[in-house]
Image (cartoon, rainbow, N blue to C red):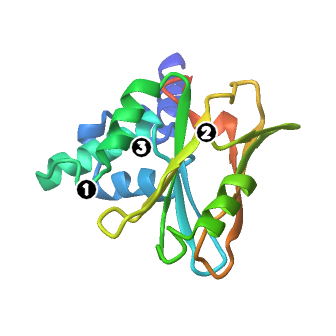
């Protein structure tokens, strides 16, 4: 009976909890990168793919995709990579695939992004600690936030202003209990 219960528990686990990244299928890698607890798409059009870029399962999925494509980390900003290496313990990064970089570089639009972009945990609000703008080579906006989320928090909400988009104000929410990877909070 115990073996049956263990088997049922094992089968109920998501693939990222039961298999190492090198065994993930291409579809599973895509799932983690696009529709997992660490990634979601936010509308209205143009919709924006948002992911917790410094979360271990995201990083493992991206690393496995690069290995399979036999490509190094393509076009990522070296300043961003240095920042992440030096600040991983105190900050995390929310990444957004940017459909248009038209508003980037406009000082007024960027100021609105800096002023209006917040992370909300319960009643606490946190402004972005910084950001790495998208470029034509790397069309990803990376927003840096303090690591303030705790496992006891219910949700973490992000409200942001995205320069250059028709509907620049967006909001998304992640369930903290869903952001666990191998038993630990992964952001």
Residue at screen point 34% across, 62% down: 138
**Mark 2 or mark 3: whose residue is earlier in sequence:** 3
Residue 179 at x, y = what percent?
A: 59, 37
Dot 3: within a 10 Å radius of its alpha carbon, few (fewer than 14), some, or many (20 or more) residues? many
Q: Secondary structure at mark 2?
A: loop
Foreground label between 2 and 3:
2
For the residues marked 2 and 1, what is the alpha-carbon distance in whole angstroms?
A: 23 Å
Viewed as shown, does residue 15 lie left or right of 9? left
Q: Which mark is residue 58?
A: 3
- Alpha carbon distance from label 3 to label 1: 17 Å
Q: Residue at x 42, y 38 (%)?
A: 57
The residue to which callout 1 is attached is: 75
* Badge 1 density bin: few <14, some 14–19, many ≥20, Cα 10 Å: few
The C terminus: image quadrant: top right
- Is residue 187 in view? no
Residue neighbourhood size for the residue with mark 2, other residues' Cα within 10 Å, grouped as few (<14), some (14–19), many (≥20): some
- Residue 14 position in % (x across, y down): 48, 41
- Residue 165 numbered mark, or none: none
Can residue 14 be seen by looking at this rendering? yes
User: Is 110 on the left or on the right of 87, as rendered?
Assistant: right
Pointers 3 and 1 in contact (C-beta within 8 Å): no
3 or 1: mark nearer the eye = 1
Camera-nearest residue between 61 and 149? 149
Across and down, in percent, residue 32 comes to 44, 50
Q: Secondary structure at mark 1?
A: loop
Numbered disc 3: secondary structure? helix
Tell me which label, 2 or 1, sits earlier in the chain: 1
Corner quadrant of residue 151: top right
The residue that disc 2 covers is 129
Q: Give the CA distance from mark 2 to mark 3.
A: 21 Å
Q: Residue at x 57, y 47 (%)?
A: 37
């Amino acid at each position: 009976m115990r073996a049956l219960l263990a088997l049922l528990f094992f089968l109920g686990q998501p693939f990222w909890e039961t298999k190492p990244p090198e065994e993930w299928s291409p579809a599973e890698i895509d799932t983690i990168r696009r529709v997992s607890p660490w990634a979601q798409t936010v509308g209205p059009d143009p919709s924006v793919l948002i992911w917790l870029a410094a979360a271990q399962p995201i990083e493992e999925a991206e690393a496995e995709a690069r290995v399979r494509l036999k490509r190094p980390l393509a076009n990522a900003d070296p300043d961003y990579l240095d920042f992440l290496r030096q600040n991983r313990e105190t900050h995390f990064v929310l990444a957004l695939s940017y459909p248009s970089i038209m508003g980037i570089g406009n000082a007024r639009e960027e100021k609105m992004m800096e002023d209006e972009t917040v992370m909300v945990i319960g009643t606490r609000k946190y402004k972005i600690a910084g950001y790495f703008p998208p470029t034509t080579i790397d069309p990803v906006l990376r927003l840096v936030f303090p690591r303030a989320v705790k496992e006891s928090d219910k949700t973490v909400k992000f409200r942001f202003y995205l320069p250059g988009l028709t509907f620049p104000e967006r909001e998304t929410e992640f369930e903290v209990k869903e952001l666990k990877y191998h038993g630990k909070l992964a952001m």
